[in-house]
Image (cartoon, rainbow, N blue to C red):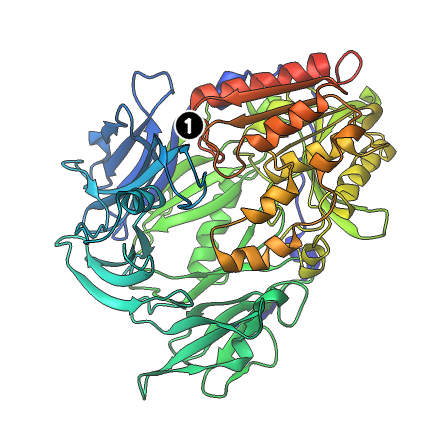
């Protein structure tokens, strides 16, 4: 594969400019609350079957169903099986050997005794998630990959813990193997993982790797599942660990330590071995060892050295991944790569795939094209289209000329009601450049006057936002009501360079919060927002940011909406994660201004809400903060029945929370509403 250095202009971000049309009607909350018409669409490895979740017939988009199609006989229509009364389908994937993997979830309440996230004492309201295997006719559903043996001495609580957390998972599909996949099964006694070759037809297993608390497999050979690399965590001081990468020496059968790939955990360098070039024996490594951004490098295990120049690099964004062929005709060849820009741009270097991709872009000129599956001769290609104004839609290209649309997630949402999206940057008060996504109401121009605006920080905080369709529904819901929405990629965000990421350490409520305030200031300076019509709304870490804004003196906001927040940093530090290394690595960065210690400074109205089955950010964070500030400022608190922390949510959850947000902004956000 030729080396590529991408010029900034080559992947310049295209903006969708407003049409100048009059403002549109607000999109009703129920249109975002409904179960998508179609989602989780995939093609089997042999290109013969299609699998998706669809809105269950007769439920008015309140429930999901599993659907499978025979691509040799599409006219016959899909086989459809609705979710059960309690266990609800939330994801599905086509495998091979006519097998289908389905994820499902149901409510559960009981004692967890410090198992995973949840209370150490008393009962926890949470969910049981399970994976099932079925065939394309849905003849029978059985628990996927499970080791059904029960071991003497394993308590009922531990067994329930494993049932909730999941005792088995799919690791690799091994595309060329007609029957086998790689799975990870947890040992119920040691709680460590063992990796097996699992036969989808016979349920037989073959051990590939037995993990321990500090050793895990890295890269599997995609042809036969052989372990090629492994990772080991070695303590080098009381709270410092080194991540060591070992590579298999096929001549000796031993794993050799490679110092050039090993890093201290606290340095937080990315070193991800993502593949091997079968011609040269070199490994593809995604790393930021040599740049602020992640680049793709070739590593020679014999010379124990990286090549002199990166294989792929970009001056502004990280390389997100390599696209490797998975069919016999292109197996393990680099077909293309992704760049972590606004919409995760894809570039194909394979001539035929590039031609297909370019043709689809011409057919759908205002959409992002995502090729998700194809058969061996590429006569059948599964792809999706989407944009900031268009919910994802799924299509099948046949014989390079005929496109069949399978459906859209939300066909009843008119794109004309959703406005313009831009990728912008602004300077924080200390000079740091803060990237951000700006969404504007449909048809708005500066001559229409300043807008009410909402600063909308993402969760994490180790995460980031991408452009395109907002799957949560929050952004188009708000812009269709006339609000401008700014999503700052504040310091502490990942995927946009190490400098920005590391700058957030121990800055919760401090410099991280300055970035949100400075985003509001930028909106005013640009003539977009009215200075007295600004709000902040966030969820999870974003909920923390909203709570922090409510107690920071002299802030720019008229009100704050705090969904599933963290408000008590002292209590968070003790329960940050069940994983000791995660507590060491990320927990040490969770420092700064603690909103629960500053509630006496509350100065703007605040709405707080959380689900009663949220074990990620338990309800005490929201309820305790509410009790502490409600005597000082107008405050509201809502506990949402049966709502977990992360989506997908039920219809009633979306309808309830969107209604809360809409009413609070209209009526209770400062004098007279926003």
Can the viewer see residue 99?
A: yes
Residue 637 locus on image (x, y percent): 61, 20
Give the answer, above or below, for where 134 lies relative to 233: above
Residue 516 locus on image (x, y percent): 75, 39
Indicate the secondary structure of the residue bearing disc 1: loop
Q: In this view, does 341 lie to the left or right of 395?
A: right
Residue 347 locus on image (x, y percent): 53, 57
Classify residue 76 by image quadrant. Answer: top left
Can the viewer see residue 223?
A: no
For image coordinates 29% across by 26% down, the residue present is 86
For image coordinates 51% across by 50% down, the residue present is 577
Give the answer, above or below, for where 539 lies relative to 189: above
- Of residues 199 and 144, the one drawn nearer to the viewer in this rendering: 144
Residue 344 locus on image (x, y percent): 56, 50
- Of residues 391 and 645, the one drawn nearer to the viewer in this rendering: 645
Count numbered badges in the picture.
Answer: 1
For label 1, count other residues whose C-alpha is less than 10 Å away and answer few (under 14), some (14-19) or many (20+). many
**Label 1 sits on residue:** 36
């Amino acid at each position: 594969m030729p080396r590529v250095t991408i010029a900034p202009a080559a992947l310049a971000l295209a903006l969708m400019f407003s049409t100048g049309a009059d403002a549109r009607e607000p999109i009703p909350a129920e249109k975002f609350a409904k179960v998508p018409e179609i989602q989780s669409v995939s093609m089997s490895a042999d290109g013969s079957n299609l699998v998706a979740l669809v809105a269950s017939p007769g439920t008015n988009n309140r429930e999901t169903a599993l659907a499978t199609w025979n691509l040799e006989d599409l006219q016959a229509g899909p086989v459809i099986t609705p979710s059960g009364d309690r266990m609800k389908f939330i994801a599905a994937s086509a495998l091979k050997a006519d097998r289908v993997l389905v994820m499902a979830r149901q409510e559960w309440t009981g004692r967890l005794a410090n198992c995973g996230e949840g209370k150490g004492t008393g009962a926890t309201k949470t969910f049981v998630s399970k994976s099932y295997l079925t065939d394309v006719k849905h003849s029978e559903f059985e628990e996927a990959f499970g080791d059904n043996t029960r071991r003497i001495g394993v308590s009922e609580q531990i067994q329930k813990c494993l049932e909730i957390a999941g005792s088995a998972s799919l690791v690799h599909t091994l595309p060329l193997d007609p029957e086998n996949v790689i799975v990870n099964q947890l040992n119920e006694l040691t709680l460590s993982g063992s990796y097996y070759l699992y036969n989808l037809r016979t349920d037989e297993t073959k051990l590939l790797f037995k993990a321990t608390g500090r050793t895990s497999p890295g890269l599997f050979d995609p042809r036969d599942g052989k372990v090629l690399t492994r990772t080991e965590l070695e303590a080098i001081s009381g709270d410092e660990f080194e991540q060591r990468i070992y590579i298999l020496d096929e001549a000796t059968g031993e794993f050799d330590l490679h110092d050039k790939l090993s890093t201290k955990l606290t340095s937080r360098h990315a070193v991800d071995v993502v593949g091997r070039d079968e011609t040269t024996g070199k490994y593809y490594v995604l790393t930021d060892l040599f740049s602020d951004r992640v680049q793709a490098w070739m590593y020679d295990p014999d010379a124990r050295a990286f090549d002199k120049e990166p294989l792929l690099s970009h001056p502004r964004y990280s390389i997100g991944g390599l696209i490797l062929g998975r069919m016999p005709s292109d197996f393990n060849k680099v077909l293309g790569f992704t760049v972590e820009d606004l919409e995760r741009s894809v570039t194909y270097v394979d001539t035929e795939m590039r031609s297909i991709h370019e043709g689809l872009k011409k057919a759908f000129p205002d959409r992002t094209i995502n090729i998700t599956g194809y058969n061996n001769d590429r006569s059948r290609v599964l792809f999706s289209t989407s944009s900031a104004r268009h919910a994802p839609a799924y299509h099948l290209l046949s014989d390079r000329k005929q496109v069949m649309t399978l459906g859209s997630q939300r066909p009843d949402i008119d794109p004309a009601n959703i406005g313009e999206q831009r990728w912008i940057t602004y300077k924080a008060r200390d000079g740091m450049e803060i990237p951000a996504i700006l969404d504007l109401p449909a048809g708005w121009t500066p001559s229409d006057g300043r807008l009410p605006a909402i600063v909308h920080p993402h969760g994490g905080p180790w995460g980031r936002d991408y452009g395109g369709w907002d799957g949560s529904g929050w952004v188009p819901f708000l812009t269709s009501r006339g609000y401008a929405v700014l999503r700052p990629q504040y310091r502490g965000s990942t995927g946009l360079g190490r400098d920005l990421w590391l700058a957030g350490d121990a800055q919760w409520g401090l410099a991280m919060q300055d970035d949100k305030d400075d985003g509001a200031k930028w909106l005013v300076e640009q003539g977009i927002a009215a200075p007295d019509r600004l709000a902040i709304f966030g969820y999870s870490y974003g909920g923390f940011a909203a709570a922090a804004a409510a107690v920071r003196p002299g802030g720019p906001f008229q009100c704050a909406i705090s969904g599933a927040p963290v408000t008590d940093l002292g209590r968070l530090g003790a329960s940050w994660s069940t994983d000791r290394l995660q507590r060491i690595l990320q927990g040490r960065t969770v420092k700064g201004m603690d909103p629960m210690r500053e509630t006496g400074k509350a100065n703007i109205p605040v709405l707080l809400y959380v689900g009663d089955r949220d074990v990620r950010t338990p309800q005490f964070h929201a309820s305790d903060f509410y009790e502490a500030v409600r005597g000082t400022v107008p405050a509201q608190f809502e506990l949402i029945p049966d709502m977990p922390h992360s989506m997908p949510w039920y219809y009633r959850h979306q309808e309830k929370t969107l209604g809360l947000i809409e009413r609070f902004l209209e009526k209770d956000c400062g004098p007279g509403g926003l």
